[in-house]
Amino acid sequence: MTQQESTQQKILQVLKENIGRHVSGNLLATRFGLSRTGIWKHIQHLKSLDYAISTHPREGYRLTDIPDRLMADELVPELGTLWLGRHYHYFLQIGSTNDRAMELASQGAVHGTLVVAEEQTKGKGRLSRPWISAPSLGIYLSIILRSPLPLNEAHHATTVAAISLAEVLGSRYGLSAMIKWPNDILVMGKKLAGILTELQSDQDLTRFLVVGIGVNVNHSKEDLVGPFRYPATSVAMEAGHPVSRKELLLSFLERFEAQYDVFLKRGFSVFLPRLTGLSAVLGKTVRITSGNNELTGKALGFTEEGGLRILLDNGKDQVIWVGDITQLEGSC
Ligand code: BTN
C-alpha cells in the first residue's frame, strides 16, 4: 500500500468513526500533516469511490453512506480469516477474475490470494459458457489455493466451496440452497451461483487451483434475462430484500477457509453427509452429458471420493466424475 493510500484509509477511518457527524477539514489536515487542499483531494477520491460525503464550508466533511463495494479497504479490516483474502486484488472491471488469478498464481501469488471484481466483461462458466457479470450486483471472485492435492482430488475444492456457500445462504438468509452436482447452487430449482475451478499441475499433483465463484446477489428479475441455460435467481429475489454483498462475501470467505482446512486435515469423506443432504439431484432421474457421451439414469448417492453413483436405465450402477446434469423429472 502506498503512503497516499494509507493516508486515505486513515481519513476514511476517522469519517467512519464519526459517521453522520461533521469532521473539520482543519482537524484532518493537522492530524495527517497535510494542507486543507490535500485533504480535499482525498475526499474527492473517496467520493469517486461512491462514499457519500457532504461538505460544509465551516463544519467540514460528513460521511453519510458507505457504498456496497467489495474493495479491500472495506473488506479486509473486517475479514476474520487467517490465510484467505490476506492478499486481496480488487478490480472495478476485469475480463475474468479466474484468468487474472491464474496469471497471479503462475507468478507465485500465495495460498489464499483473492481476486474480486465489481464487473467482468468476459466472465467464464463451465464448458466455455459465458458468466454474465452485471456491475456491482453480484459477487465475482477467484481464490488461489496452493495445497498440492493429487489431481484426482482437485474437484473436492469445488465441492467444499459449494457446501460452504450453500450453508451460508441457508444460515444467513434462510434460503433452501441445494447443490446441483458438481458446481451449481440452486434455490427452488433456479440457479443462484456457479463455480468454475481451474488448475495447473505438475505430473500427478496440482501446483495451484483457482476456484472461481459467481453469485447472483442483488439482481432483479429484469437483470437475469439473457442467454441463461436454467431459470436464474438471486439472493435478493429469494430473500425478498436487497442484501449486503460485503456481508455475504465476508461470511462465505470465513466459512470456506474453515471448511477447506477441515478438508485438508480430515479428508473429503467427512463432507459426504452434508453433500448428500444438500444435493439437488439425489433420487432424481437425470441425464449426464460429458463431451459426446450421454447417460440417463437415477442419481443414487455419492462415493467416498465424491463421485456420483447412477443407476443406469440398463440396470448397471456407474460412478460419474464429470459431466453436465439435466434433471428429467421436474426442473433442474
Ligand atoms: C458455471 O456455473 O458454469 C460456473 C460459473 C463461474 C463464474 C465465476 S465468476 C468469477 C469467476 N471468474 C470467471 O470468469 N468465472 C468465475
Image (tube, grey):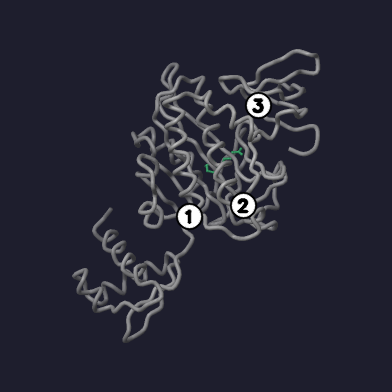
Q: Which residue is drawn at 45% across and 16% down?
A: 204
- Work out how far the residue at label 1 is from the one at label 3, CA to CA, in angstroms: 32 Å
Q: Which residue is drawn at 58% across and 53% down?
A: 217
Is the CB atom of the residue marked by disc 1 within 8 angstroms of ligand 1's nearest atom? no
Q: Is mark 3 on a helix, strand or loop?
A: loop
Q: Which amino acid does label 2 sit on?
A: Val
Query: Which circle's residue, 3 or 2, is located before the other in the chain?
Result: 2
User: Mark 3 Cα within 10 Å, few/some/many (few <14, many 20+)?
Assistant: some
Q: Dots 1 and 2: beta carbons under 8 Å?
A: no
Whole-percent x, y for residue 268 in the image = 51, 25
Q: Residue at x 30, y 64 (%)?
A: 8
Q: Residue at x 37, y 77 (%)?
A: 21
Q: Which amino acid does label 1 sit on?
A: Lys
Q: Is mark 1 on a helix, strand or loop?
A: helix
235 over 67 or under it: above or below: above
Q: Dots 1 and 3: beta carbons under 8 Å?
A: no
Label 2 sits on residue: 235
Label 3 sits on residue: 323
Q: What residue type is labelled 3?
A: Gly
Query: Which circle's residue, 1 or 3, is located before the other in the chain?
Result: 1
Please identify, in this view, whether the residue under mark 1 or under mark 3 is nearer the observer: 1
Is the CB atom of the residue marked by disc 3 within 8 angstroms of ligand 1's nearest atom? no
User: Mark 2 Cα within 10 Å, few/some/many (few <14, many 20+)?
Assistant: many
Which quarter of the picture shows residue 293? top right
Q: Dots 3 and 2: beta carbons under 8 Å?
A: no
Label 1 sits on residue: 246
